[in-house]
Image (spheres, helix red, strand yellow):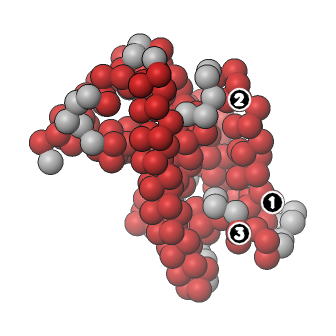
């Protein structure tokens, strides 16, 4: 527990130094200013769509950026020989990124959206989208040498993750959307800002539990097999 708390404190400081906090502030101000211009009658679908898009991007690219920065600074080599466990390293990073996502979305919502929302579902939606996508961002980043190589497969993955938005907007309603890992987050966002059938919420929570468990194991194995091997060969 002490190691994890120390890792969390270090990660907050690290992300602050890497300007992640400033980027989150910029996103908050930008979306707040843009969405404030949308009439109240049409704000709900626009806000949900923006949050869905933003949550899909935030943790994914920032997790990759942090990985490459630490790789360049040879931080990862030091981690291999410290008492800090892989799960603690990942937990610290993802906790801070997820907390930032929760705050950014909440601030934008408070500024532009006056109706009551279900904050419990909102937090679950953010966590459910941020954690798996951040884990996969780490897994994917570890397979490439730099951000330029990462961008093409990363963008392809993000486009795939946006498909549930087509179902939400009524453009393409297909049962196959329920297989996409971002669909549970979309359902929980709907539940937060409007409503969703109980069976969909149950599916979303179960699917998220599977995604987070599988993503965590995959990220741990990636750290051990890929990063440790690179350090050993370095």
Check if mark 1's residue and mark 3's residue have beta carbons within 8 Å: no
**Residue at 87% over, 66% down:** 172
Residue 54: give x, y in percent of width and height: 61, 42
First in sequence, mark 1 or 2: give its number.
2
**Residue at 51% over, 76% down:** 206
**In the depicted structure, whether residue 49 falls above or below residue 210:** above
Instruction: Give neighbour class at mark 1: few <14, some 14-19, many 20+ (Cα, 10 Å).
Output: some
Residue 223: give x, y in percent of width and height: 44, 39
**Residue at mark 1 to residue at mark 2: CA–CA distance:** 23 Å
Q: Which residue is mark 3?
A: 179
Q: Which mark is residue 151?
A: 2
**Residue at 71% over, 29% down:** 151
**Residue at 22% over, 30% down:** 82
Local SS, label 3: helix
In the picture provided, is 31 more to the left or to the right than 138? Answer: right
Question: Which residue is more in the foreground, 36 or 208?
Answer: 208
Question: Which residue is more in the foreground, 163 or 210?
Answer: 210
Instruction: Give the residue furthest to the front.
Output: 233
- Which image quadrant is residue 152 in? top right
Residue 97: give x, y in percent of width and height: 43, 39
**In the depicted structure, whether residue 16 falls above or below residue 130:** above
Local SS, label 1: helix
Instruction: Give neighbour class at mark 3: few <14, some 14-19, many 20+ (Cα, 10 Å).
Output: few
**Residue at mark 1 to residue at mark 3: CA–CA distance:** 14 Å
- Which dot, 1 or 3, sits closer to the camera? 3
Residue 14: give x, y in percent of width and height: 33, 23
Check if mark 2's residue and mark 3's residue have beta carbons within 8 Å: no
- Which dot, 1 or 2, sits closer to the camera? 2
- Which image quadrant is residue 3 in? top left
**Residue at mark 2 to residue at mark 3: CA–CA distance:** 24 Å
Whether residue 19 is visible here, answered yes or no, is no
Q: Which mark is residue 166?
A: 1
């Amino acid at each position: 527990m002490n190691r994890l708390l120390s890792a969390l404190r270090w990660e907050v400081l690290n992300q602050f130094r890497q300007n992640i906090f400033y980027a989150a502030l910029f996103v908050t101000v930008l979306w707040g200013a843009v969405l404030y211009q949308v009439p109240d009658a049409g704000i709900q679908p626009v806000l949900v769509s923006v949050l869905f898009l933003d949550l899909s991007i935030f943790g994914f690219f920032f997790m990759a950026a942090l990985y490459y920065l630490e790789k360049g600074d040879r931080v990862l080599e030091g981690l291999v020989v410290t008492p800090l466990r892989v799960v603690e390293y990942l937990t610290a990073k993802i906790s801070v990124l997820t907390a930032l996502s929760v705050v950014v979305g909440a601030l934008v919502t408070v500024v532009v959206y006056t109706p009551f929302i279900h904050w419990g579902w909102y937090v679950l939606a953010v966590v459910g989208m941020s954690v798996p996508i951040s884990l996969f961002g780490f897994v994917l980043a570890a397979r490439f040498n730099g951000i330029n190589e990462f961008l093409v497969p990363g963008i392809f993955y993000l486009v795939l993750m946006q498909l549930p938005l087509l179902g939400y907007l009524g453009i393409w309603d297909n049962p196959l959307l329920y297989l996409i890992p971002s669909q549970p987050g979309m359902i929980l966002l709907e539940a937060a800002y409007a409503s969703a059938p109980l069976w969909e919420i149950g599916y979303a929570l179960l699917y998220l539990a599977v995604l987070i468990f599988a993503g965590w194991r995959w990220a741990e194995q990636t750290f051990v097999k890929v990063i440790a091997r690179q350090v050993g060969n370095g």
